Image (cartoon, coloured by chain):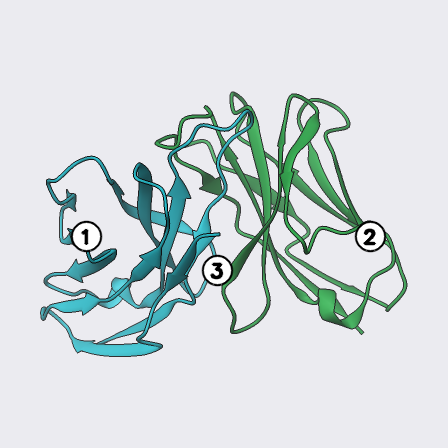
Chain colours: A cyan, B green
């Protein structure tokens, strides 16, 4: 079974600064997908960024980028130019790459609470 | 923008009572999921559903739980006899396709409180 670990329960960052969230995972699969989800106080889960394991290039979405180290099974998220609206819980998630008959489940880490200070 | 809608946003129920949590997935989506998040803990997979049947379920999803797509638009999670430990946030999600790259869209969640 896959496991996802986020070792930082909480992080704070000054507005406009950069913060990096850690995520490690364990799997025996070679093809898989990794995600970062944001959960603001409204509690809705919002996809921030995704990475396909077979792609060596790190994914980037505006101020959000990842550092994907497949051999180390590490998938960190960097938030640049932090904004007050980035304050939220961030979850790292794993999805196996073997296509199942009816969709693929997500396995989540425990989350990191990010507080952006003005 | 299409979204997954869940009702109610908050439900309080007495232990032993049955509850039904409702979800309206995005209209052209074919794959549906329920997840739960106990307060302060990680989000956990409960069940996935496709073509009117369960495709995968977790250990949490025991005989007390059931899912149904009664009318082609709603997707429901029923808990037959609620326990205190069922208190959690329940998220419905849907995706259009079966490929792993197919994004799962989440609803805003239903907070279930069992007293």
Name the one closer to the observer, A75 or A26.
Answer: A26
Cα distance between the residues tagged 2 and 1: 41 Å
In the rendered image, which residue does mark 3 sit on? A43
Q: Position of residue B20 (x, y in %)?
A: 78, 48
Q: Is residue B107 left or right of residue B86?
A: left
**Dot 2: element:** loop
Q: Are marks 2 and 3 in contact (CB under 8 Å)?
A: no
Cα distance between the residues tagged 2 and 3: 25 Å
Mark 1 Cα within 10 Å, few/some/many (few <14, many 20+)? few
Counting residues from the start of the chain, the first of labels 3 and 1 encountered is 3
Mark 2 and mark 3 on one chain: no
In the rendered image, which residue does mark 2 sit on? B64
Q: Position of residue B8 (x, y in %)?
A: 68, 52
- Examine the rendered structure and indicate whether residue A99 appears above or below residue A63: above
Q: How many marks?
A: 3
Between marks 3 and 1 in the image, the one whose residue lies nearer the viewer: 1
Q: Are marks 2 and 1 in contact (CB under 8 Å)?
A: no
**Residue for point 44% across, 56% down:** A108
Mark 2 Cα within 10 Å, few/some/many (few <14, many 20+)? few
In the rendered image, which residue does mark 1 sit on? A71
What numbered label is drawn on residue A101?
none
**Residue for point 10% across, 40% down:** A57
Q: Position of residue A25 (x, y in %)?
A: 33, 58
Q: Check the residue under mark 1 and report the chain it is in.
A: A
Between marks 2 and 3 in the image, the one whose residue lies nearer the viewer: 2
Mark 3 Cα within 10 Å, few/some/many (few <14, many 20+)? some
Q: Position of residue B88 (x, y in %)?
A: 64, 65
Location of the C terminus of chain A (image quadrant)? bottom left
């Amino acid at each position: 079974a896959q496991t996802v670990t986020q070792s930082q329960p909480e992080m704070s960052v000054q507005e406009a600064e950069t913060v990096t969230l850690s995520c490690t995972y364990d799997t025996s699969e070679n093809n898989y997908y990794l995600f970062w989800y944001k959960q603001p106080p409204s509690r809705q889960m919002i996809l921030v960024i995704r990475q396909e394991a077979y792609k060596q290039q790190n994914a980037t979405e505006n101020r959000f980028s990842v550092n994907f180290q497949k051999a180390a099974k590490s998938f960190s998220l960097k938030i640049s130019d932090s904004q007050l609206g980035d304050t939220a819980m961030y979850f790292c998630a794993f999805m196996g790459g073997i296509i199942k008959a009816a969709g693929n489940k997500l396995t989540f880490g425990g989350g990191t609470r990010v507080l952006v200070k003005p | 923008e299409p979204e997954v809608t869940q009702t109610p946003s908050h439900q309080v129920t007495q232990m032993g009572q049955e509850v039904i949590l409702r979800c309206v997935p995005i209209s052209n989506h074919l794959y549906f999921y329920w997840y739960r998040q106990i307060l302060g803990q990680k989000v956990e997979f409960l069940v996935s559903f496709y073509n009117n049947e369960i495709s995968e379920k977790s250990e949490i999803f025991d005989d007390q739980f059931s899912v149904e797509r009664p009318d082609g638009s709603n997707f429901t999670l029923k808990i037959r006899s609620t326990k205190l430990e069922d208190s959690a946030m329940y998220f419905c999600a849907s995706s259009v396709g079966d490929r792993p790259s197919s994004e799962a869209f989440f609803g805003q969640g239903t907070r279930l409180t069992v007293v």
